[in-house]
Amino acid sequence: MLARIRSQAAAGIDVSQHAADEMDAEAVTLDDVREALATAVLLEDYPTHGRGPCCLLSGSTVAGRPLHLVCTSTRPRLLLIIVYKPQPPKWTTPTQRRPRP
């Protein structure tokens, strides 16, 4: 799955309005997204999501900034649905969710 996502990203990345809004709010550039994709690991796969199959990736920029990316590879080009910096209280580390009570 990661190989397909990286291949699609090399051809171009489409950004949803929601992702663009979050990128603006968190000062994340498309270059940051590309860097995070290069180091990304798959955290969660959502093959039966209501809006279509997608997945949650965790990666870091060259500067070491952790980012989470939710994207779908079901289109010819990679579609970035959301991007955010993982942080408490939802995340204890960039790759570990806080246990639910």
Image (cartoon, rainbow, N blue to C red):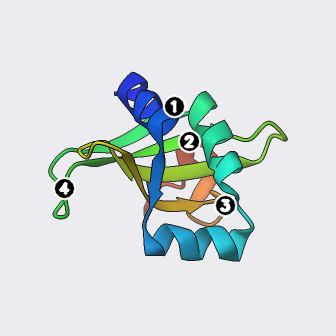
Q: Which residue is mark 3?
A: 87
Q: Nearer the viewer, mark 4 or mark 1?
A: 4
Query: Mark 3 falls on what kind of element?
Result: loop
Q: Is residue 79 left or right of residue 41?
A: left
Query: Mark 2 falls on what kind of element?
Result: strand
Q: Nearer the viewer, mark 3 or mark 4?
A: 4
- Farthest residue toward the right? 63
Which amino acid does the dot numbered 2 rest on?
Answer: Ser
Q: Which residue is mark 4?
A: 52
Q: Which residue is mark 1?
A: 41
Q: Nearer the viewer, residue 39 or 5?
A: 5
Q: Which residue is mark 2?
A: 58
Q: Residue at x 47, y 30 (%)?
A: 6
Expressed as whole percent of the image width and height from the top left, the position of residue 48 reads 14, 51
Query: Mark 1 falls on what kind of element?
Result: strand
Expressed as whole percent of the image width and height from the top left, the position of residue 28 reads 70, 61
Disc 2 + disc 1, Cβ < 8 Å:
yes
Q: CA distance from mark 3 to mark 2?
A: 12 Å
Q: CA distance from mark 4 to mark 2?
A: 20 Å
